[in-house]
Image (cartoon, grey):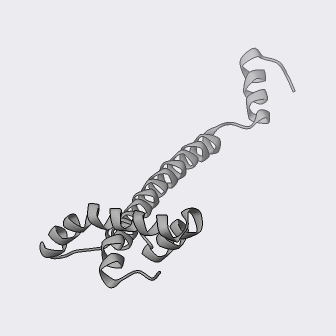
Amino acid sequence: MALTTEQREVLAHVVVDPDAWFSHAVATFGAEKAAEFLEAKVARWGPDYEVKKAAGGYKDRAARQAEEDAAAAAKLAAEVAALAEQQAARVADIALVLDVMPTRATKDALARLITGQSA
């Protein structure tokens, strides 16, 4: 059994890949049960699909998922950039401390001067 255009469009409203969904249903439950599940899904989601399609600017589930994924990726990239900036600032702070920190030899020489010991 092949999906009709209407069935494919309604399924695309709620699943990313209608053909894969139906193929999986057939492989898992058999053609007869898969057809029942398909009709139930189309009956359940058909009215919602029609309303949203009529409202204009309709996007199927795959398009909505792609947008959600892109937004999540952009958010993650921004978070990674912020963390990298924080890390760079910490590294700069540590480098500054290391630049002004006296070496062990300098510390030893200062300690000898303070205590009056000779080298």
Given residues 66 and 24, the one toward you in this image is 24
Name of the residue lying farthest toward the right: 119
In this view, 2 is above or below 91: below
Is 62 placed left or right of 21 in the picture?
A: left
Name of the residue lying farthest toward the top: 115
Image label count: 0
The answer to whether one can see residue 111 in this image is: yes
Give percent across and percent down for residue 65: 38, 66
Given residues 112 and 86, the one toward you in this image is 86
In this view, 77 is above or below 115: below
Q: Residue at x 49, y 50 (%)?
A: 83
Give percent across and percent down for residue 77: 46, 61
Given residues 101 and 79, the one toward you in this image is 79
Q: Quadrant of residue 90?
A: top right
Give percent across and percent down for residue 89: 50, 49
Q: Residue at x 61, y 47 (%)?
A: 95
Given residues 92 and 47, the one toward you in this image is 47
The answer to whether one can see residue 69 in this image is: no
Name of the residue lying farthest toward the left: 55
Is 89 placed left or right of 11 in the picture?
A: right
Q: Residue at x 34, y 62 (%)?
A: 40
Q: Residue at x 78, y 22 (%)?
A: 112
Is 74 placed left or right of 6 in the picture?
A: right
Give percent across and percent down for residue 38: 39, 67
Where, quadrant-wise, is the C terminus in this rendering? top right
